[in-house]
Image (cartoon, rainbow, N blue to C red):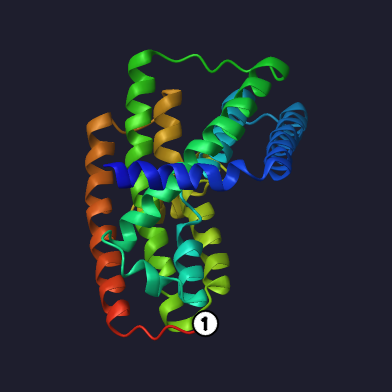
Amino acid sequence: MDVYISLIKIGFLKLQIYTFAKYLVLISSVIFVSVQFFLWRSIYATNELPIMGFESVFIYLVLAHLLTTIYPSRASNDLASMVESGDIAHLLLKPIKISKSILFENVGVSAFNLIAIVLPTLIIVVLFFRVDFLVSAGRLFAFINIIILSYLFVYYFELFIGTIAFKTESIWGIQNLKFAIVALLGGRFLPFEFYPEWALKVIELSPFRMIYDMPINYLMGTSNNVLTEIIVFQIIWIMIMKLVSSIFIGKSLKNLMVQGG
């Protein structure tokens, strides 16, 4: 347990030392939220959209943006960087699995982003944009549990993406593809209510909707799924993705040829 706590501290402190960068990220977060507010307010001022109200759309997009800062989206880059630099050879000598080492460091990063970016952005949204985020304690607790499971799914998915570096030594191209897939099938930039019917049929089969759509709509009370359905869906896909990533990492390590310093 002490090892895991130390890894979390390492991940937290990695970002804490970049004070200027921290403020830049917070400023960019506020700018993004502001753009979404004025953009959608203009759209609703000139068009009647019965699908969702303006405030619901704005809250959805704010939460999706903030969840992105919490999720371990850098895990694939961490693994790829280790392969490119050769540092993975040193990590293999340590008495902790690579997957766990990367996971707990990313938990530290997420904790830092929660404190330095998510909470300040939420405060600004409530104070300056007059948005009501009040929810019941029970719904908030359930939402946190959904996010934890979504976090694990994102992590194992990122780990799978990172294994591509074992073959290519670079995942720049696949990262762009990953971003597009997750944004489209997860509902990153647009609620599913705006998607056409044929697209929703495809998305229903996708696990990526647990990243944004499921947790946010549950918190907002607009979900079509009950809590148990969401949890079961998440657990099944976490198990699948964990198995897939473990298989790929295992095979990749067997054939690993480290290059670099």
Where is residue 260 shown, x and y percent of the image?
52, 82
Residue 68 versus residue 226 in the image, above or below: below
**Secondary structure type for disc 1:** loop
Quarter of the figure with the N terminus: top left
Q: Mark 1 packing: few (<14 Cα in 10 Å), some, or many (20+)?
A: few
Where is residue 197 shown, x and y percent of the image?
46, 49
Query: Would you say 8 lies left or right of 58 here?
Result: left
In which quadrant of the rendered view does residue 45 lie? top right
Q: Nearer the viewer, residue 138 or 217?
A: 138
Numbered circles on residues, count: 1
Residue 163 versus residue 124 in the image, above or below: below
Where is residue 211 shown, x and y percent of the image?
42, 45
Where is residue 177 shown, x and y percent of the image?
54, 67
Query: Would you say 209 lies left or right of 118 here?
Result: left
In which quadrant of the rendered view does residue 34 lie? top right
Query: Would you say 174 lies left or right of 255 here?
Result: right
Per the image, the residue denoted by label 1 is: 260
Q: Nearer the viewer, residue 37 or 69?
A: 69
Query: What residue do we see at 67% from left, 40% from top?
Result: 22
Q: Nearer the viewer, residue 113 or 205?
A: 113
Query: What residue do we see at 45% from left, 75% from top?
Result: 83
The answer to whether one can see residue 37 in this image is yes
**Amino acid type for the residue under numbered disc 1:** Gly
Residue 175 versus residue 67 in the image, above or below: below
The answer to whether one can see residue 109 in this image is no
